[in-house]
Every structure is written in C-alpha cells, then in structure tokens.
Image (spheres, helix red, strand yellow):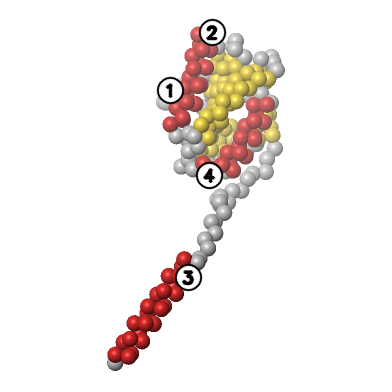
Amino acid sequence: MINHRLFTNCFCFLFSTLLLDSCNNIEYTPKPRMYPRIIYPDYKMIPFKQSYCPFTFEHPDYWLFIKDTSFFGEKPLNECWFNFEMPVFKGTIHCSYYDVSTKEELTKYLKDAFKLAKEHQIKANYIDEIPIVKPNHVAGMLFNIEGPSASPFQFYLTDSLKHFFRGSLYFNSQPRPDSIMPVNEFVKKDLMGMLNSFEWKQ
C-alpha cells in the first residue's frame, strides 16, 4: 500500500513538472488583424444637378439622394439641404447650403464649420485639416478626423462671396476605427471625387 501511494505521488509530481515545462516552451503567434467581411458596391459616377442648388458635381450612384424636408421639426433654412444615404455602409452624408449676403455671415459659417469639426476632437486621435483650392472660385477645407469619432470626414466649400456649402459624414454604428477603416478609405475616395468635380453654376 505504501509503495503504491509512493508511486502515485511520484507519477503526479513528474506529470505536473512535465506539463508546466511544456507550457513554458509554447510559442505564441499573434493573430493577424482581421476585418469584418465587406461587400463593396459596383458603381458609376453620375451628375448631381438639382435645379434649386447653385452647384453641380459628380457622385457615385450608390449614394441615394434624399432632400431634407424638416430640420428639428421646422423647415430647413435653405431649399438646398439634402442627405446622401449609403445603405450598404449604414452611412449618411449630411449636406447643407447657405446663401451669403455679408462678410459677417461668411465669417459665422466658417466659424461654425470649424467648431462642428472640433467637437469630435474629444474622441479623435487627431484632425487633419486639408485645404481645398480649385479653379472658378471654389475653395474650402476637408477635415479628416482620425480615431473613434462619430464623423470621420467633414468639409465646406465657398466662393467667399455668395455661396457656402457644408457636408459631414456619419455612420450609424459604434465607431471602431480598426473595423471601419476600410469603409472610410472607400468612401473617402468617392468623397474626393465629389469635391474634385464640384463647380458653382454660372
């Protein structure tokens, strides 16, 4: 009986020692970064030519145009307020246009655009301000907002005299930079196509 107990104890000790030693020799390989599977749409660029808006541009046909009819329960400040819905990405580009009558009005709209972009600085890693300068009096700023922000891109365009146009992209999902990054890059490319083709109507 004693020998059997001694044998059992020795066996358990040796087994435990071998098990602990094998655990120390395990090599861990980090898993590669994975993204959720995303089905990107096939699309073509189409012209935006709403008669009540004083500008034109091109945009992908997977952006669905929806005119704003209400702003916090009231009529929008201008008829040229609209959204581009992107159901495939659960995203929306909110667009608003303002007539500019005075220098003071333009200053206010510019300050508001910077203020609305800076509001995301609390969650953002940083905000890259990219100037936009085009022929035919088209100038503005693209705000590239990096990090877990609700809005990764915002922009404004103006002729500094009569027109001010602003847009902001939002996704209807929890902002996770790593998982949303491929979609951001895809939409950003199309957003740049919109901005590069933007013109004021003569």
Which callout, 3 or 2, points at the residue further toward the start of the chain? 3
Which callout, 1 or 2, points at the residue further toward the start of the chain? 1
Element class at badge 2:
helix
Which callout, 4 or 1, points at the residue further toward the start of the chain? 1
Query: Looking at the rendered structure, which numbered label has been put on residue 178?
Result: 4
At label 2, the amino acid type is Lys
Q: Mark 3 points at which residue?
A: 22
Query: Looking at the rendered structure, which numbered label has been put on residue 173?
Result: none
Q: Mark 2 points at which residue?
A: 103
Vertical placement of 134 versus 126: above or below? above
At label 3, the amino acid type is Ser
Element class at badge 4:
helix
Q: Mark 1 points at which residue?
A: 74
- Disc 1 packing (10 Å; few <14; some 14–19; many ≥20): few
Spatial CA distance of label 4 from label 1 is 38 Å
Spatial CA distance of label 2 from label 4 is 42 Å
Spatial CA distance of label 3 from label 2 is 75 Å
Element class at badge 1:
loop
Residue at 45% from the left image edge and 25% from the top image edge = 71
Which callout, 4 or 3, points at the residue further toward the start of the chain? 3
Which label lies toward us, 3 or 2? 3
At label 4, the amino acid type is Asp
Question: Which is nearer the eye, 4 or 165?
Answer: 4
Vertical placement of 113 versus 9: above or below? above
Spatial CA distance of label 1 from label 3 is 70 Å
Question: Which is nearer the eye, 136 or 123?
Answer: 123
Which label lies toward us, 2 or 4? 4
Pointer 2 with pointer 4, Cβ within 8 A: no
Residue 198 is drawn in which quadrant? top right
Which callout, 2 or 4, points at the residue further toward the start of the chain? 2
Spatial CA distance of label 4 from label 3 is 35 Å
Residue at 55% from the left image edge and 36% from the top image edge = 85
